[in-house]
């Protein structure tokens, strides 16, 4: 079976984590004191509609999370060669302001082609926290949780500057830069 077919099948469940994971909002009331505020429910519907029309961006976003997750375990960590290839793909897109659906599919394929069957199988078992029931919790200390509208213009899950969740951009940028830097160091080492 070709890697491309396996990638499509195994990674269909597919992402800030690595760069933009929290963009997906679970459609449940957990974490909201049992009741979903109407404004949050409305935002969730907007995000659901956006994701339905941006499936490849959604897949790539989840894939980025899954790659970071498997890379933490010695049995599935990226090899020296894989680290270099992944770093090159990520660096090529790191500062681009948007990514089309076709481009997201292409980037997902490039990253999937780098992975081994064992890594792809492990990735297919990993569900990002924002896709799990109750995966998103309101902020600590009773702070009001707010959600932006889905991207109206450009969005690139590899570029944290395009995150609609502005308050998450600094952490996403730091984590993404650290991951790419680590991949580059391992590729040279």
Image (cartoon, rainbow, N blue to C red):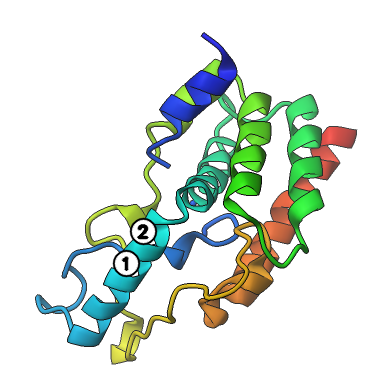
Identity of the residue drawn at 30% across and 60% down: 135
Q: What label does residue 136 carry, if any?
A: 1
Which of 123/147 is in front? 147
Q: SS of the residue at dot 2? A: helix
Identity of the residue drawn at 55% across and 46% down: 60
What is the x, y in percent for residue 72?
57, 39
Q: Please state if 151 lies on the left or on the right of 90 as rendered.
A: left
Q: Is residue 72 above or below residue 180?
A: above
Q: Please state if 17 lies on the left or on the right of 95 as rendered.
A: left
Q: Is residue 155 above or below residue 106?
A: below
What is the x, y in percent for residue 39?
25, 86
Identity of the residue drawn at 57% across and 47% down: 64
Q: What label does residue 18 carry, if any?
A: none
| Number of other residues with Cα within 10 Å of mark 2, as a class: few under 14, some 14 to 19, many 20 or more | many
Quarter of the image where the C terminus is located: top right
Q: What label does residue 130 carry, if any?
A: 2
* Any part of residue 49 in sight: yes
Q: Is residue 12 above or below residue 139?
A: above
Q: Are marks 2 and 1 in contact (CB under 8 Å)?
A: yes
Mark 2 or mark 1, which has the lower sequence index? Answer: 2
Identity of the residue drawn at 52% across and 26% down: 7
């Amino acid at each position: 079976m070709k890697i491309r077919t396996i990638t499509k099948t195994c990674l269909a469940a597919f992402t800030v984590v690595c760069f933009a994971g929290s963009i997906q909002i679970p459609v449940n009331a957990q974490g909201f004191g049992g009741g979903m505020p109407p404004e949050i429910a409305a935002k969730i519907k907007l995000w659901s509609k956006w994701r339905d029309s941006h499936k490849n961006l959604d897949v790539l976003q989840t894939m980025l999370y899954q790659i970071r997750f498997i890379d933490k375990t010695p049995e599935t960590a990226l090899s020296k060669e894989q680290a270099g290839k992944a770093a090159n793909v990520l660096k090529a897109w790191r500062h681009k302001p948007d990514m089309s659906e076709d481009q997201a599919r292409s980037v997902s394929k490039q990253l999937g082609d780098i992975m081994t069957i064992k890594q792809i199988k492990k990735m297919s078992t990993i569900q990002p926290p924002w896709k799990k029931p109750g995966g998103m919790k309101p902020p600590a200390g009773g702070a009001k949780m707010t959600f932006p509208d889905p991207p109206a213009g450009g969005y690139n899950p590899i570029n944290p500057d395009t995150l609609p969740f502005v308050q998450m951009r600094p952490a996403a940028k730091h984590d993404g830069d650290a991951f790419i830097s680590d991949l580059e160091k391992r590729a040279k080492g």
